Amino acid sequence: MAAVRPVICRAFCTLAIVLATLFWSIGTAAQQRSIDDLLKAYEAGDYQVLNRYVTTTGTFEQLRKELGSEKEGQLDGAMQRWDAERRPAHAVFMLELALVGSSRGWPHWLDVLSAGTRFLVIRPDLPGEHPEWDAFEVAWHKAAVALLQGIGRPDLLRQHGMLPLASRMGAEPAVGRMVDPWIALARGVNQEQFAKVPGAAEPLYVAAALGFYEVAARYPSTKAEALVRKAGLVLDMGSAADAIKSLDLIDGTSIADPDVAYWFHMQHGRALEALERFDDAQRAFELAAGLSPGAPSPHIALAALALKRDDRARSVEFARRARRHAAGARDPWWAYLSADYRLFGPRLVALRRLVK
Amino acid sequence: VTGAIRALAALTAALAFLPVWQQPTFRSVTEGVVLDVLVTERNRPVRGLTSADFHVTDNGVPQRVLDVSHETLPLDVHLVTDTSGSIHPALLQSLVRSVNRVRQQLRPKDRVSVLPFSHQVREQVWLTPAGDVGEIGLESTGGQTSLNDAIALALMTPLERNRRQMAIVFTDGFDTTSFMTEAATLDVARRSHVALFVVAAGDRKTLPARFLEEIAATTGGLAQIAQPVQAVEQHFLRALEDFRTSYVVRFVPNGVERGGWHDVSVRVTKRGRYQIRARRGYFGTR
């Protein structure tokens, strides 16, 4: 009897392992979804499907493999199937997949983003042939670049965002190119980000950025931001008078984008302070504070200005206000260098509307 | 007699409107300029010095030291800690230990502030008697780094008679989101009465080391690079110890223009191989 007991135990153990393996495989088969299945759900309006499904690097990598790649204009994997019946949903879905990878810090999200860019760029028709596709593609690139501007890596922004668009988009009309002055602004931001990298050859990048901002300043849609950014750069290089000249070309009260209007007043305040026009600088910082009451930066600026004017009591009071803003305050200044990253959300929502 | 009274009244009124010598950077109007001076020999604080042992010049002009005190005034300690996305859990734990060790070392009349920062600088505790502050907790807030803003806000604090103020700032990287530039922050430091000590984790390539050394030295403080991160606590305590054991040297400027930047130099006349650390100068008002 004693000899039989281990045999029974072994049999039970084996059965348990077999059953567990069986249930696990059934469960896995039920959970694993193909990229086309997820795309279908996405197109039906379930915009959170990837967020829910892609919770591990394993699932992300599985989808990345299914997505396929592009080599010298030849697609494979899902991208090859999608190419035959191109819809905006395909590219937006790729952007969403890249976003999920980015938000979880998985490095290959950039490959997915690049695949999306390439998928759009190698479409069979040339820019200008189908204006609605051009408009969609520009909107997609603007969202992708916005995402890249927010990661604080100008080298990756250049590699995955700006270089693929080098001959694809321009500020001025040209054969075979899509036109949007935004591209000049985006190129300037890329150079400005390079200039801010510690140890960078700042003057070279600043010169390049200024060139792009001067182009962007010729167009109404990008003029205000281009001139504000130009002013900020020349001020950093020590030329407050040139900064004022740049800002004087803008009517600060008519800037449509509230963040750009805020940046205008903050840069104006900085330039006026550098010229020791302290009363005017104070007014500029107060205008910025009025536009964004929850932002600490104008109070920091006013505190430093008051200290410079030997008004210690006011300095202390403004510093106190700056420190006591509620946790989670929103300050457009913090978004200055990441430029369009603040617009990524609205741009993605606009793209989702095109999927329907 | 009436004429004499009128003349005296007129003179008094005129005097009332004369520009007074406002105390330039440091404590009160009547106190003159007050300097925190650390004197060490072979890395150990030197004790027992008197006003006769100090030689102070203001813009190159020798000044008479009125008095010197040592470890008598209570301290205000601002603990300014980076809690941005780059601070990993082990480093955060080390920081929590460090700020609490400093809190434990404070005396009943000392006060403490806690200012964590990422892109936003927040006031968690403000100038509260050390005994009333319980265990200090810090949370990783994620986000970017407004190092310059954090330094500036720690330096723009109320001037209090008969108290000494220091800030210990911790960071692990470069500034990414501040409104304040390095130059503007340095200007605040030159006008502030607070001694700035910086503890930075990482290596020089990943830190604005030159700026941090410059701004700390301007205020009479010190920038230390903690490598490995376990050394953070030791550097916090050293900052407190250095400031605590500094002499408070007072003089009323004489024979110099009142306004503008004043270069100050301090030397110990007593024989010995002393290392001296003091702020580099102050801004005077006309």
Image (tube, coloured by chain):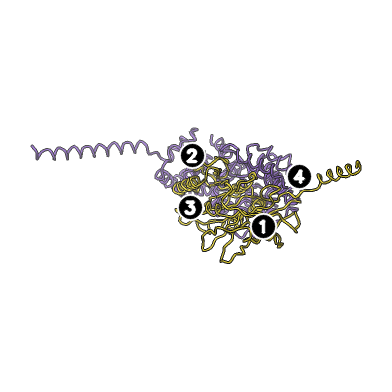
Chain colours: A purple, B yellow
The mark nearer the N terminus, 3 or 1, is 1
Q: Nearer the viewer, mark 3 or mark 4?
A: 3
Dot 2: within a 10 Å radius of its alpha carbon, few (fewer than 14), some, or many (20 or more) residues? few
Dot 4: within a 10 Å radius of its alpha carbon, few (fewer than 14), some, or many (20 or more) residues? some
> Are dots 2 and 4 on a single chain?
no
| Relative image position of residue A11 (x, y in whole percent) | 17, 38
Of the numbered discs in the image, which one, if any, rests on residue B134? 2
Helix, strand or loop at label 1? It is strand
Protein chain holding label 1: B
The residue most toward the left is A1
The residue located at (68%, 56%) in the rendering is A237
| Relative image position of residue A330 (x, y in whole percent) | 60, 39
Instruction: Residue under label 1, please give it.
Output: B65
Q: Quadrant of the N terminus of chain B?
A: top right
Instruction: Residue under label 4, please give it.
Output: A280
Instruction: Residue under label 3, please give it.
Output: B232
Q: Amino acid at mark 4?
A: Asp
The alpha-carbon separation of the residues under discs 3 and 2 comes to 21 Å
Dot 1: within a 10 Å radius of its alpha carbon, few (fewer than 14), some, or many (20 or more) residues? many
Helix, strand or loop at label 2? It is loop
Q: Quadrant of residue B50?
A: bottom right
